[in-house]
Image (spheres, grey):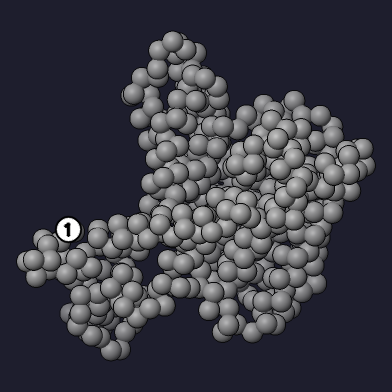
Amino acid sequence: MTRVFPTQKKLNVCKEHIHSSRVLQENSMNDSSKFATSIPLTCQKIKDFHPVGVFHGDNPFSHNFVILMLEYILVVTITHIVRFLIKPLRQPKVVSQIIGGVIVGPSVLKRSTWFKHYITTDGAQFLSRNLGIMGFMFFVFIYGVKMDPALIKKTGKMHLYVALVGISIPTIAVFGVALLLRKTMDKDIATNSSIGIIAAYLGITAFPVLYNVLKEFNLLNSDVGRMALAMAIIGDALGVFTVVVFEAGKQGETGPENALWYMVSLVVIIAFVLFCVRPIMIWINDNISEEFPVEQSYAVAILLGALVMGFITDFFGLAIANGPLWLGLVIPDGPRLGATIVQKSETLMTELLIPFSYIMVGSYTDVFAIAGVEWSNLAPLFTMVLTGYFTKFFSTWIAALYWQIPFRDGLTLSLIMSLRGQIDVILFVHMMDKGVISSSTSLSLLLHIIYNLFQLIYNKQNLLQYSL
């Protein structure tokens, strides 16, 4: 069987093997004008999805399903090994997941000629990346269900002001530093919209990131933990607004009408979720008895709705993760509908789909690619990252001291609010897809995420004491 589809790449030399692609030239002649056009096509041989077995002379590594399962087994095994090795450092699980994905990617295993030839196929990468995107979609959906937007109204002035200071100062500082260094930047991050997206990324701390870390350290019910989660919810609200504004600016770079339609689509979808979907979810929740489980049809429909919302937002260029997040936010949290949805989908997300997400992240990350980039091109980004980290850390700490929060509590709070995790990985993959950053830039941001998570080492005694 042969699949033929257009391609933008032109290959001059082709080799005949199972994973090769050939570019064919299809000349179509117009009888009236005698004008010939050349259309590049990719012709790729497709074999059966499953192997018939090695005893029949079949090579299992020539089938995408076998390669997909092998990558899954490798990343899960490597993740658990890394987690065991760094367990004495008491690092969050996301650190081992990111490292596992990087090891399976072109940074380590895929540098092997054999591994790259037999395991790295277009079909297997297509499947793993789409499963990885689904994993991130369900990740933000589940934590959208766990979040309670009503807490924003219940937060006191202290939480609001500390959160505003901890977000606005680093965002403004990074944006200002980037404007000063714009002449030395790559073209992909020198625009106002790209600078704004990166500045907002460095200034925000997402609720799902903190929830995971605080849960692992048994800090959810501590004073500092509750304060950090309340501030994270405020930060998410401001962060979504900021990213949307700069995303609209990115759309407007190709024409002002694109930015206008972007905002119109955003308003229409949010109105649909608030005034159509939310009443339905409240009705379902009110008609469920705590003594009886949620009907299977409701749960399946809601989980399918997460995929539908992802499709809608991606269709209109609003980022595929926003749809599931907004759907999760309008589902009432609690012992009935919200708890049931989390229970039915969390294991599927964490154990099956999320490993594919980090395979996707690892495929985007090549630590050796940074060697081919001049330091003058990377220096502006590193300066932005360092500016964002230190200004966020010290601005949060100073704001906490202003509100007479104890010295050690303020130090712990500022450290926690500087953490990075899964949401930041999703954002950096999204920025790569949008052309905001390149592969070398994404590597720098990924290293920033790992570095921030490893900062927990330096406040280990405080965290241990709070967990007791």
Residue 213 at x, y percent in the picture: 62, 44
| Residue drawn at the location 43% of the way across and 42% of the way down | 349
Q: Nearest the camera: 153 or 54?
A: 54
Q: In the shown orientation, is residue 111 left or right of residue 333? A: left
Q: Nearest the camera: 273 or 331?
A: 331
Amino acid type indicated by mark 1: His
Which residue is most to the left? 56
| Residue drawn at the location 58% of the way across and 82% of the way down | 371
Residue 4 at x, y percent in the picture: 21, 69
Which residue is most to the front? 88
Badge 1 marks a residue whose secondary structure is loop
Would you place residue 412 above or below residue 375 in this image? above
Which quarter of the rendering shows the C terminus? top right
Q: In the shown orientation, is residue 333 left or right of residue 14? A: right
Would you place residue 431 above or below residue 164 in this image? below
| Residue drawn at the location 72% of the way across and 50% of the way down | 460
Would you place residue 227 above or below residue 165 in this image? above
Q: Residues within 10 Å of mark 1 (few under 14, many from 20)?
A: few
> Which residue in the structure is indicated by mark 1?
50
Q: Nearest the camera: 349 or 220?
A: 220
